[in-house]
Image (tube, rainbow, N blue to C red):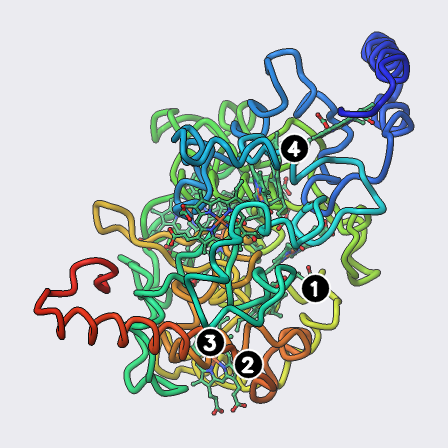
Amino acid sequence: MRKTPWLIVGVANLLLGGVFAIAVVSPPAQIKTLLLPGKTSHGHYQIEMKCDACHGSEFTTMQDACLKCHQAELKLAKDTHPSSKFNDPTNAERLSLIDAQKCVTCHEEHRDGRTGPMGVTVPIDYCFYCHQETYKSRPSHAEFSFDSCATAGCHNYHDNTALYEAFLWKHADEPDQLPSPTLIRRARQFSALAVSGSTADAPEESLDDKIVHDWSVTTHAMAGVNCRKCHGASTLPADTGAEQILETWSDAVTHETCRTCHELETTTFLQGKHGFRLAEGLPPMMPADARLTMHKAALHRQLTCNSCHAGHRFDTQFAAADACLECHADDHSLAYRGSPHDQLWQRESDGGEPGSGVSCATCHMPRTVADNGSVHINHNQNDNLRPNEKMARDVCMRCHGLQFTLDALADEQLVRNNFNGRPGRQVPSVEMAKTWLNSRTKNRNKAGATPTTNTPE
Ligand code: HEC
Ligand code: HEC
Ligand code: HEC
Ligand code: HEC
Ligand code: HEC
Ligand code: HEC
Ligand code: HEC
Ligand code: HEC
Ligand code: HEC
Ligand code: HEC
């Protein structure tokens, strides 16, 4: 809040307070958003009507709000510049130039004119404040300018898990296509085509033929997840009369019901753009509220589990691409149809080798293995979205070499046309890491020492 006159801040606070009081009796969203000092960033505008999500009184500082939602994710990304790094007195000195311990130093909010990709509000050459010595220590960097450090395929500020030297070194020289792809298999106990023996336990009124048929060929039917397990009263004894069932029956089924059996899918759904409004107690996300281009016919659909898992088939093959394309109509999404990846997916859908196809979900909702070995689908489609090197390790590198992967992800045009074609540029990082680490190993060997640091995992 460096130069903002305190009077303005005071008035804004008063107005905000006033609005919270009025909110009890009037439609809050419109009034609150009128008070926004500027457009909210791409990551947050869908929850902007809930000012409290960040400005709430439960947070002592804004930092607490940021950490509540983002701490776990940055930790998993092995954040290269966590606040704790600057507690070290030798590094603390640099903070007088740029206070890297506070998120808002680089991610202010409602700053329309100067908000870049990923909510970054500082000019991108700020690495200069802390890394001037790099020019001296790395001859290869002598010609680089500071606004190029964060170029795609070079460095990220937070997540360098696919870009650190030892990793680049280890995966240098891989071919464009790996000889044996290693996509994680879904762990299904039931074959979707087996015929179920159970009888639907719904009241007469709800026994629609199509619904019963669709349900009967699903893994739900096979696993004994009968109608009432989702529509309520699953605890009633089996011989309960139809009338009593009807009393507890509800046609509506929310994600909270699904959560009772699918905890991880639901938690991750609530963390991404599709579900985070529900997590904040707001009405569900609708394509009509999107900044991305959506199909007109879908504008008023609400995003729930059913948006992709249409009842009562819960067909995961449909969910993986066809469902997405009912809503998404940006260039990248539309270009998927007919792409090399889509062709592989069509072949898999027609009975080909499981895991050989690449659907929207292969990239945006990758499968993960929990500590206990169970396989889940990450339903937070923002988890690996930006910066896009996040997709390298868990997705692309299961089938492609590292150099090809980084080249493809760094080529904006290729991303826009959904990887129809070959990368048009080559990221130099891999070669640079090779040269640097090879020369260091050689020097050490000459000196008779064994290379210990930077040993690839
Ligand atoms: C996702 C988090 C988030 C949400 C949601 C949010 N804000 Fe903010 N807001 C911020 C951040 C970050 C700042 C900058 C704080 C700083 O610089 O210390 C800010 C600053 C402000 C300021 C001070 C502006 C200035 O010039 O210093 C006002 C006024 C404000 N917000 C109003 C609102 C209102 C009204 C809403 C709801 C309609 C809202 N905000 C929702 C994160 C949020
Ligand atoms: C209520 C939870 C919540 C709070 C509070 C919150 N965020 Fe976010 N933030 C999200 C979600 C959800 C997204 C969108 C999904 C994603 O990109 O991970 C997001 C997106 C972002 C992005 C952009 C990612 C992109 O790809 O565009 C940045 C940067 C970010 N948040 C930083 C912050 C900072 C800094 C604060 C504190 C001022 C903050 N967030 C407060 C939930 C929150
Ligand atoms: C010194 C500047 C700086 C500070 C301080 C900073 N960030 Fe970032 N942040 C960036 C840049 C630059 C990016 C763009 C991607 C990259 O280079 O890592 C980014 C990206 C992000 C993203 C997008 C996803 C990802 O994994 O990169 C999130 C979320 C985020 N920041 C949250 C935070 C939070 C929370 C804090 C405070 C704990 C914070 N940032 C502090 C510069 C900063
Ligand atoms: C506030 C100071 C500060 C800023 C600003 C900063 N860094 Fe750093 N960075 C550090 C410190 C401290 C380290 C720890 C190693 C060291 O002492 O050089 C580090 C380490 C790194 C590393 C090596 C990470 C590792 O562990 O392998 C990379 C890469 C990096 N920074 C890139 C960047 C980039 C790119 C930017 C700008 C987008 C940036 N840094 C901005 C302070 C900073
Ligand atoms: C895995 C959970 C689940 C099971 C099992 C299930 N349903 Fe549903 N059902 C849903 C969902 C989700 C909806 C949509 C609710 C909504 O949109 O609010 C729904 C909707 C309905 C509706 C409302 C009309 C419609 O088509 O939307 C009827 C009637 C219905 N189900 C009957 C049944 C019957 C009969 C069975 C057993 C054969 C059954 N359901 C089994 C989840 C389930
Ligand atoms: C009473 C527990 C229960 C409830 C409630 C439940 N499910 Fe399931 N679901 C299961 C079981 C068990 C399976 C089979 C798992 C397997 O194949 O290993 C399953 C499988 C699935 C599958 C995979 C289908 C396939 O073809 O492999 C999807 C998708 C799914 N459920 C979605 C939902 C949704 C959405 C809801 C809420 C509307 C829901 N489930 C409610 C227990 C439940
Ligand atoms: C954006 C679309 C989308 C939404 C929304 C969605 N899912 Fe899924 N879900 C998928 C896709 C795609 C798959 C299959 C991915 C694969 O095969 O790798 C899947 C798979 C599943 C599975 C099977 C998991 C397994 O390991 O076999 C379950 C269970 C499931 N979803 C539950 C849910 C629940 C519960 C919700 C709501 C909280 C939900 N889904 C919302 C797209 C979605
Ligand atoms: C019912 C409509 C609907 C369906 C179905 C749907 N989405 Fe979305 N999706 C949205 C909306 C709305 C947003 C938020 C866009 C915005 O805020 O501009 C979104 C956001 C996203 C984002 C984040 C974009 C960003 O820039 O942060 C990704 C990635 C995404 N969806 C992928 C998928 C995939 C993959 C599927 C299928 C497995 C899918 N979606 C199914 C409506 C849908
Ligand atoms: C081979 C992997 C891959 C496939 C397949 C794929 N995407 Fe993407 N998608 C990406 C990457 C990489 C990005 C770019 C992230 C970035 O750089 O901002 C992206 C971005 C997006 C975005 C955000 C666009 C924006 O402008 O913010 C949406 C929405 C999206 N994809 C939806 C889809 C849908 C829907 C499908 C299927 C029809 C699909 N994607 C297929 C990898 C893929
Ligand atoms: C399941 C394996 C698999 C995954 C995951 C995958 N791909 Fe592919 N990809 C392939 C195969 C196989 C081809 C070759 C198709 C062909 O030759 O017809 C291909 C083709 C391509 C092409 C076009 C090459 C050409 O010569 O036309 C690009 C670019 C590409 N992939 C990039 C990516 C990126 C980037 C990712 C991650 C975001 C990714 N792929 C994820 C298997 C995969």
Q: Nearer the viewer, mark 2 or mark 3?
A: 3
Residues tagged 1 and 2 counted as in contact (Cβ below 8 A): no
Q: Which residue is mark 2?
A: 342
Indicate which disc, 2 or 4, sits on the residue closer to the N terminus: 4
Image quarter of the C terminus: bottom left
Residues tagged 2 and 4 counted as in contact (Cβ below 8 A): no
Mark 1 residue CB less than 8 A from any atom of ligand 8: yes
- Residue 210: image x %, image y %? 57, 58
Q: Judge the density around disc 2: few (<14), some (14-19), many (≥20) Cα neighbours within 10 Å.
A: many
Indicate which disc, 4 or 3, sits on the residue closer to the N terminus: 4
- The relative height of residue 243 versus residue 408 in the rendered view (above or below) is above
CA–CA distance in space, label 4 to label 3: 32 Å
Label 1 secondary element: helix
Q: Which residue is mark 4?
A: 104
Residues tagged 4 and 1 counted as in contact (Cβ below 8 A): no
| Residue drawn 41% across the image and 54% down it | 377
Q: Judge the density around disc 4: few (<14), some (14-19), many (≥20) Cα neighbours within 10 Å.
A: some
Q: Amino acid at mark 4?
A: Val
Mark 2 residue CB less than 8 A from any atom of ligand 9: yes
**Furthest residue toward left:** 448
- Residue 118: image x %, image y %? 65, 50
Q: Amino acid at mark 3?
A: Thr
CA–CA distance in space, label 2 to label 4: 41 Å
| Residue drawn 87% across the image and 18% down it | 5
Q: Quadrant of ligand 8?
A: bottom right
Mark 4 residue CB less than 8 A from any atom of ligand 1: yes
Q: Amino acid at mark 2?
A: Asp
Indicate which disc, 2 or 3, sits on the residue closer to the N terminus: 2
Q: Which residue is mark 1?
A: 326
